[in-house]
């Protein structure tokens, strides 16, 4: 039986080879899996930014068509604009100027969740894209930005001269409903509307007093800075805003101003 | 027998594992590919947002009786997001380095835009389009008419061809640059690695450059972001440029910007800057439309006053298109015995007046000397200038634009048609036309200009605003 030893040897090599190959594969797969997870997270971030950008464009298009900015949706308005009891498009009295959601159904956006809202790429029910719009008075015209032709009534120079709209700050420290506190903390005070994604941790309730908590305060002052993994003060919100003069620019282009 | 069976089993297993491995790497590659497309989109999106905000800033900002629309902000040199208040003289002979810096995103009201590699955007502005602190005092500065407000910045395509010539009339008003990843910058003395990290003491806690000048700090030095093309066919350095607006200096404007990517010898990338331009064509037609709207608003306000009963000031005939076509006259208007107002919104002296009918500083017609009262409702104030309501004196944007603004007031109204002669809108009482010369057959459909051709090319150098 000259062939027996050779058979055994062959079997032994195959097993060793297999073990080596498996080891190499395991190393490769683990190397591949880490970047894959990071890539998926990065892709979700990209997708969220893309959705915010699309929302920004659609809100601006709505303004050009209707001569006003849309009112935010409420928790129960199924993605439609939410007005006060006596409010409508002609007086622009929104129910939730600074603590509502993007009215995805009203704007004809897609994809919508079952209730008619747009979600960010993390897709939990608490990841609906939020939307805030300036509801103040400009040149004696109340709710000038959300009232049909309210910006026309307020006039171009007065819109330009008004010193404050919505605030966006670099940090919640010092920020109140009235502004960002120190001048260096202020990113803008002239945002006509703000779009907000609560990010990967959107399903969690943010710690009180933190930057993410300020964004859910709903008082017209928002915070954004680079994402931070600091467990004490995590921040992964994505904030997008449009200044008043860009809204004005679109309205002029559309022939709705001056 | 047994050897063959064993070997076959292992080979199959290996083949399956190999296939799985290949499939996984393909999946990873596909995902990476999609991400790089998404990264490219992020740069394009940031550049597009910056362009739109700059155009909006130039065209739609509030204006006053002295300084009209058309100006762009100075760059941000120290990285605090705000435009510097000044960036060189009117002809561009001084302050050249101050006209290249970071995009002043706070001044523009934007979020802090970043390109796909996470870098802030850079920005250069033409000396003719930048504002000056004392612009209202000089006629050449307030004059932003089509023949004067020429771009002065040269831009080359990535193949080295000049596509916007700043030495001639086709220069651009501004460029926005996404700097991309750091690379080894080609310089006359050899390669220089772009380092964007701030040396200790050069920046404050917020990353603002506190050196004097700010360009001494690495994050504010354009050479650490903007690249230099190899010599020969592409003699271009994006970290410096020349943009003179005087005749003598204009010839030097060939030093401009080059769009990436540009390859060096050996196939490596020498310039990875992505350049977006704000061209003359992007701004000027829109500024003309803004001028038309401003004049129309003045005429509408004048006609709406009870004394005027819907009538407009009679035009000063020009361009041989009859009595009812011409330029706007200056105050005092020749109103004869019609009872119409001799100024844009009032007669003078005339007291008492109905204050409710008078405009405030904010909503007054911008052709005329505005009242001091900011509003929102006019209250009688002692400081009203006696010239209130007169056409603004020179230097003012209106004096520069006046020869280019025409009104047509046909007795039977104006009809609007498209280029094929089909009705394109409701008939109007009158129209304001802004054009760089007497409007021709591409604007007026007949001799007396009772028919206006609308809806043409948006880059046409004329604009129409109607009055009803």
Image (cartoon, grey):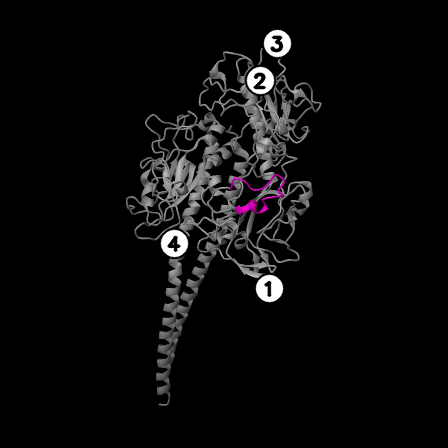
The numbered dot on residue B58 is none
Front-most of residues B290 and B377: B377
Q: Is residue A200 above or below residue B72?
A: below
Q: Horizontal and vertical percent for residue B151?
A: 62, 41
Marked residue nearer the N-terminal end (2 or 3): 3
Q: Secondary structure at mark 4?
A: helix
Quarter of the image with the C terminus of chain B is top right
Residues at discs 3 and 1 both on one chain: yes
Q: Secondary structure at mark 1?
A: helix
Give the labeled residue for mark 2.
B343
Residue A151 counted in the magenta span: no
Nearer the camera: disc 2 or disc 4: 2
Nearer the camera: disc 2 or disc 3: 2
Residues at discs 4 and 3 both on one chain: no
Q: Chain of mark 3?
A: B
Residue bounds of the magenta highlight: B84-101
Q: Callout 4: 10 Å neighbours few (<14), some, many (20+)?
A: some
* Marks 2/4: CA–CA distance: 65 Å
Marked residue nearer the N-terminal end (2 or 1): 1
Q: Chain of mark 2?
A: B
Residue at x-position 54% and y-position 48% = B177
Give the labeled residue for mark 3.
B337
Q: Horizontal and vertical percent for residue B397?
A: 60, 29
Give the labeled residue for mark 1.
B266
* Marks 3/1: CA–CA distance: 83 Å
The numbered dot on residue A41 is 4
Quarter of the image with the N terminus of chain B is bottom left
Find out whether the residues at labels 3 and 1 contact each other: C-beta distance under 8 Å: no
* Tally of marks: 4
* Marks 1/4: CA–CA distance: 36 Å
Q: Is residue B269 left or right of residue B207?
A: right
| Residue B468 visible (yes or no) | no
């Amino acid at each position: 039986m000259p062939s027996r030893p050779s058979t055994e040897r062959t079997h032994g090599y195959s097993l060793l080879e297999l073990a080596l190959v498996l080891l190499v594969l395991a190393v490769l797969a683990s190397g591949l899996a880490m970047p894959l997870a990071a890539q998926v997270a990065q892709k979700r971030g990209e997708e969220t930014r893309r959705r915010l950008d699309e929302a920004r464009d659609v809100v601006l298009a709505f303004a050009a068509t209707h001569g006003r900015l849309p009112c935010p949706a409420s928790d129960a308005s199924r993605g439609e604009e939410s007005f006060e009891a006596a409010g409508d498009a002609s007086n622009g009295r929104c129910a939730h100027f600074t603590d509502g959601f993007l009215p995805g159904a009203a704007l004809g956006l897609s994809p919508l969740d079952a209730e008619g809202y747009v979600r960010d790429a993390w897709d939990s029910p608490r990841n609906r894209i939020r939307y805030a719009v300036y509801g103040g008075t400009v040149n004696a015209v109340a709710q000038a930005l959300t009232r049909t032709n309210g910006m026309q009534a307020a006039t171009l120079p007065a819109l330009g001269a008004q010193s404050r709209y919505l605030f966006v700050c670099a940090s919640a420290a010092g920020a109140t409903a009235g502004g960002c506190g120190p001048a260096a903390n202020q990113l803008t005070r002239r945002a006509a509307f703000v779009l907000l994604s609560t990010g990967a941790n959107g399903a969690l309730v943010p710690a009180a007093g933190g930057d993410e908590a300020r964004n859910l305060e709903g008082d017209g002052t928002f915070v954004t800075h680079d994402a931070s993994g600091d467990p004490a003060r995590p921040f992964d919100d994505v904030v997008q805003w449009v200044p008043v003069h860009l809204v004005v620019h679109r309205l002029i282009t559309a022939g709705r101003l001056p | 027998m047994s050897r063959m069976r064993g070997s076959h089993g292992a080979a199959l297993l290996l083949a399956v594992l190999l296939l799985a491995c290949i499939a996984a790497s393909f999946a990873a590659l596909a995902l990476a590919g999609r991400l790089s497309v998404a990264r490219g989109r992020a740069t394009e999106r940031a550049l597009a947002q910056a362009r739109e905000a700059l155009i909006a800033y130039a065209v739609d900002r509030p204006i006053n009786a002295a300084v009209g629309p058309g100006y762009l902000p100075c760059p941000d040199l120290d990285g605090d997001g705000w435009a510097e208040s000044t960036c060189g003289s009117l002809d561009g002979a001084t302050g050249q380095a101050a006209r290249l810096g970071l995009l002043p995103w706070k001044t523009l009201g934007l979020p802090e835009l970043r390109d796909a590699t996470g870098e802030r955007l850079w920005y250069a502005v033409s000396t003719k389009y930048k504002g000056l602190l004392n612009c209202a005092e000089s006629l050449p500065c307030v004059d932003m008419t089509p023949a004067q407000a020429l771009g002065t910045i040269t831009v080359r395509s990535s193949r080295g061809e000049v596509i916007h010539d700043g030495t001639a009339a086709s220069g651009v008003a501004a460029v926005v640059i996404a700097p991309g990843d750091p690379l080894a910058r080609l310089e006359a003395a050899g390669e220089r690695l772009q380092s964007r990290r701030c040396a200790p003491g050069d920046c404050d806690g917020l990353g603002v450059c506190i050196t004097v000048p700010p360009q001494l700090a690495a994050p504010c030095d354009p050479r650490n972001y903007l690249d230099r093309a190899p010599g020969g066919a592409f003699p271009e350095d994006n970290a410096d440029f020349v943009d003179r607006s005087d005749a003598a200096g204009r010839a030097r404007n060939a030093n401009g910007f080059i769009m990436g990517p540009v390859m060096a010898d050996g196939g490596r990338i020498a310039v990875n800057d992505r350049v977006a331009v704000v061209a003359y064509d992007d701004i000027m037609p829109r500024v003309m439309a803004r001028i038309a709207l401003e004049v129309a608003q003045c005429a509408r306000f004048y006609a709406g006053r009870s004394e005027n009963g819907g009538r407009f000031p009679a035009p000063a005939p020009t361009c041989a298109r009859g009595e009812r076509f011409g330029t706007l006259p200056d105050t005092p208007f020749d109103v004869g015995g019609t009872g119409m107002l001799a100024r844009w919104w009032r007669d003078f002296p005339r007291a008492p007046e109905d204050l409710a009918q008078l405009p405030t500083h904010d909503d007054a017609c911008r052709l005329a000397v505005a009242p001091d009262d900011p509003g929102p409702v006019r209250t009688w104030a002692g400081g009203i200038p006696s010239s209130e309501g007169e056409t603004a004196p020179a230097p003012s944007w209106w004096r520069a634009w006046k020869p280019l603004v025409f009104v047509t007031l046909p007795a039977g109204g104006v009809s609007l048609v498209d280029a094929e002669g089909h009705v394109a809108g409701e008939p109007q009482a009158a129209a304001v036309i802004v054009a760089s010369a007497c409007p021709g057959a591409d604007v007026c459909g007949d001799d007396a200009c009772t028919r206006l051709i609308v809806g043409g090319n948006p880059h046409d150098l004329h604009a129409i605003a109607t009055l009803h």
